[in-house]
Amino acid sequence: MKVWKGLIMFKKNATLKTLFLGRVLLAVLLLVLLFGSIQLYVINQNINSEVEKQTTMAAQNIKREIENNNLAVESLENQIDLKLISYAKHIAEIVKGKSIDEITNQDLKMIQEELEIAGITMFARKGEDIVGVLSTDSNEIGFSSREFGFYEIADTLIKGEKPTVGGATLVDYNVLVLPIAQSGSHQNDTVFFKYGYYHPPGSSYIINPYIEVDEVDKFLNEVGPSSSIAQMKTDNPFLDEVAILDPLVFVNPSLEDELYPRLKQIVHGTFDNKSEEDINVLENMVTKPEKASYIQEVNGKNYIKCFYLLKTIRSFISLLIMGK
């Protein structure tokens, strides 16, 4: 009887020991899982903090580059503006004393060759319009200021008054210079020029010299944000995409088709991995200019996307930084 009682007590103690060890192991496992979760959370927080730090630094660098680029653009455009108007006044001196009917396209071509510029057009009234009546480029002859929404400006100039043009880089009485704009007379080609307009006081026409700006654009891309973005992606492997975007053009994509002002959705960089959420963020930035950041899955991988709003000389733009 005592033997049986001993066996029963042994089994009972063994069961209690097993139960105790099981509970201890479960507690240890839970602690391991808890500490592992905490460690994973801390690691993720550190990663997110580092990514946030890197993207903020990238945004500051790009902003600084844009500011420097804007100063370069302003300085360069100011030099071009003054040169264009000096060309126009030189042309005015050459044709001084002649009516528009006494000047020929050949006269303008000779002056064009002398000045080594892209072209010269002369505008004058024709019926209820102001049109290109003489030019070194046949595409410019017949160009209607009314058709392209330029009539009021041309009319103001030809009256010897000071035009009001948003975004113009030089404005004065009888004088106007526009920023780089697409040619409206070259329908089959995308050609960009820098246009100057000068109305010689007392005359019945506007002299319009212009220069092609491909080289200017090339220069600005080499020293401006585009080159900085490329270098930034080389120096920071975690960066996948960096882009300077214009939210206003995402709200109204037809603005890209306007001849003036020159607007694009993607100003610099690339925006290949865009999503509907991204587009909504950009559109909301027009009315509610706030920074936005979130994690998004792209092609099976998680990325953090950060949108910053930057103030430029002429408008607000958005900076996208997408990091792994």
Image (cartoon, rainbow, N blue to C red):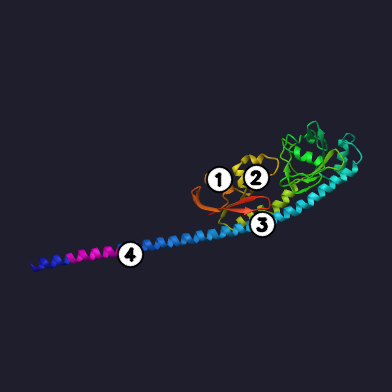
Q: Earlier in the sequence, mark 3 or mark 1?
A: 3
**Which residue is pictured at 66% across the width and 50% down the height?**
315
The residue under label 3 is 65
Which mark is on residue 28? Answer: 4
- SS majority, magenta: helix
The residue under label 2 is 264
Query: Of the residues shown, which amino acid type is indicated by label 3?
Result: Glu
Q: Which stretch did the figure color magenta?
A: 12-25
Contact check, label 4 and label 3, Cβ < 8 Å:
no
- CA neighbours of label 2 inside 10 A, class few (<14), some (14 to 19), many (20+): some
Say if residue 274 shows up in the picture: no
The answer to if 18 sits in the magenta stretch is yes
The alpha-carbon separation of the residues under discs 3 and 1 comes to: 25 Å
- Image x and y of residue 101, in percent: 88, 34
Give the image quarter of residue 113. top right
The residue under label 1 is 279
Badge 1 element:
helix
The alpha-carbon separation of the residues under discs 1 and 4 comes to: 48 Å
Contact check, label 2 and label 4, Cβ < 8 Å:
no
Badge 4 element:
helix
Badge 3 element:
helix
Query: Of the residues shown, which amino acid type is indicated by label 1?
Result: Ile
**Which residue is pictured at 56% across the width and 50% down the height?**
288
Q: Earlier in the sequence, mark 2 or mark 4?
A: 4
Instruction: Give the farthest residue toward the right.
Output: 97
- CA neighbours of label 1 inside 10 A, class few (<14), some (14 to 19), many (20+): some
